[in-house]
Image (cartoon, rainbow, N blue to C red):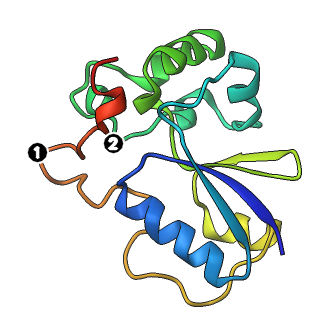
Amino acid sequence: MATILFYEKPGCGNNTKQKIWLAASGHTVLAKNLLTEKWSAEKLREFFGELPVEKWFNPAAPRIKSGEVNPADFDAPTALSMMLAEPLLIRRPLMEVDGECRVGFDEDAIRAWIGLNQAKPDGDIEACPKGHHSQPCPIPEEVSHA
């Protein structure tokens, strides 16, 4: 089984479900705070692979939900610069296993990559469950002043 560096937004319900499912599948999950990690553009870029730039963004980020930021408008260098300045824009989770990096929680891709058991948690495991609410998830105290 794999040891996974799992970059999350602390307090995110879906990130919690994802970690539980990975652990129940026999993996060791080392959770890290995506919002306070000291990212470089080069390291962050590794997680996105061949995905189009607009898929790098967290669709539940407040500035994206409000329409202030349109992920389709940016090239890779601009997107990375924005994400370094505002980590809430980064799609989550970011996962790294033995130097291989991935973004998001596509269960089929993860099953093929490192394995997942069949005990999937209820509901959509990647989309923000609060996406239909007007109130965003709380921002952890340590990044709320950034």
Q: Position of residue 128 (x, y in %)?
A: 34, 55
At numbered mark 2, what does the secondary structure look like: helix, strand or loop? loop
- Camera-nearest residue between 112 and 38: 38
Seen as rendered, the residue at the extreme front is 142
Q: In the visual, does 103 lie left or right of 12? A: right
Could you tell me which residue is drawn at 73 percent across and 74 percent down?
27
Quick one: label 2 or label 1, which is nearer the N terminus? 2
Seen as rendered, the residue at the extreme left is 134
- Camera-nearest residue between 145 and 71: 145
Q: Position of residue 29 (x, y in %)?
A: 66, 64
Relative to 96, residue 38 above or below: above
Could you tell me which residue is drawn at 41 percent across and 50 percent down?
10
Q: Position of residue 67 (x, y in %)?
A: 25, 25
Q: Which residue is mark 2?
A: 60
Q: Is residue 26 in sight in this rendering?
A: yes
The quadrant of the image that shows the C terminus is top left
Relative to 83, residue 7 above or below: below
At numbered mark 1, what does the secondary structure look like: helix, strand or loop? loop
- Camera-nearest residue between 107 and 36: 36
Q: Which residue is mark 1?
A: 134
Q: Is residue 125 in sight in this rendering?
A: no
Q: CA distance from mark 2 to mark 1?
A: 11 Å
Could you tell me which residue is drawn at 52 percent across and 46 percent down?
92
Type of the residue with mark 1? Ser
Type of the residue with mark 2? Ala
The quadrant of the image that shows the N terminus is bottom right
